[in-house]
Amino acid sequence: MSSFRSVIQRLPAVTRVPVANVTRRTFVPIAMRSVALRNFSTSMRRLGEGETDSELAASLQQEINYEKEAAETAGGHESEPDWLRQFKSEGIWHVEDKSGSDEIALTREFGNENIRVLFSIGEIDTTDPSHELDQNENDQVSAAAEDEFEGSFPVRCAINVTKQNKGSLNIDAQAQDGQFMIENITFYKDDVLATELTSDADWQRRGLYMGPQFETLDENVQAQFESYLAERGISTGLALFIPNYAELKEQREYCAWLENVKNFVESN
């Protein structure tokens, strides 16, 4: 199966919006810790074969502890946020989320239509945009973030509205600040070709007409398309949910990654 990224590679690049609450913190240099952690004697090795294994494992454990403390403050790693419980209780969308994968699918039925919304946590920018700024500039960025970046960051979505043996509408859009910003709408006569996530299907789709840019359509047609999608639940509520879920998923996968890498480094 080809990844979801192949579906959205044709979309133009966008400027990412900084997301403060997923920024990774700066580690305390491990070299400044007790000399007891820096025992390079081969007779004292407990981890792998390398002399730096213990330092790397300690750094990973430091970050694991930090993430656990942050999670406990927020209500615990395993607990579901209220907004997620509410979303699931509505029973409209089914969340397809496989542990270890960076892709999420939301699916539902609407009359004789099957609807799927695909997005990826690869869309989240976890870098710190202010790490090279001095203190004054950093304060200015923080103040500006409160005023300008209270909203969510953009997440690319691939939306399919499919009727069996009738074709499919494939919509390229971005979910941000409670809105779906549509970029392109493609119609495929073959609904199987439209929804298959294989390299062969992706290659065949690349040779087909992709449709006009959404912004070039008549404004009345644009408004009707937006109403068409909103009636199917692709509206404000879902546009708010997607960035929140992407951020939650990214955090969970990051914590699992820390544990897996640490266990690997420590294994004999």
Image: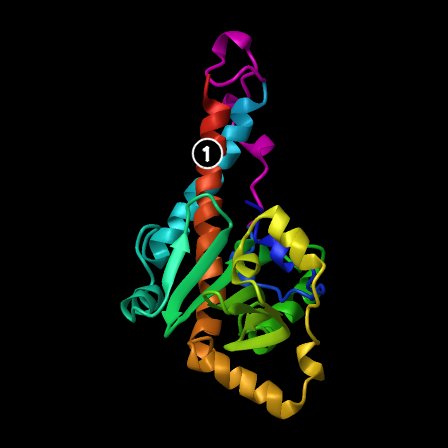
Confirm whether residue 127 shows in the render.
Answer: no
Q: Residue 174's image quarter?
A: bottom right
**Where is residue 253 shown, x and y percent of the image?**
46, 46
Per the image, the residue denoted by label 1 is 260
Check if residue 28 falls in the magenta segment. yes
Residue that extends furthest to the front in the rendered view of this protein? 165
* Left or right of 92, for residue 154: right
For the stretch drawn in magenta, the main secondary structure is loop
Q: Residue drawn 42% across and 42% down? A: 65
Q: Residue 20's image quarter?
A: bottom right
Amino acid found under the numbered disc labelled 1:
Asn
Q: Residue drawn 55% across and 72% down? A: 176
Q: Residue drawn 32% across and 50% down? A: 78
**Where is residue 74 shown, x and y percent of the image?**
36, 58
Check if residue 120 falls in the magenta segment. no
Residue that extends furthest to the bottom in the rendered view of this protein? 220
Q: Residues within 10 Å of mark 1 (few under 14, many from 20)?
A: few
* Left or right of 1, for residue 100: left
How many numbered discs sit on the rendered protein? Answer: 1
Q: Residue drawn 41% across and 52% down? A: 97
**Where is residue 67 shown, x and y percent of the image?**
43, 47
**Where is residue 8 shown, x and y percent of the image?**
63, 59
Q: Nearer the viewer, residue 114 or 29?
A: 114
Q: Is residue 52 above or below residue 203?
A: above
Find the magenta span and give its range: 25-50
Q: Nearer the viewer, residue 54 or 184?
A: 184
Q: Classify mark 1: helix, strand or loop.
A: helix
- Quadrant position of the N terminus in the picture: top right
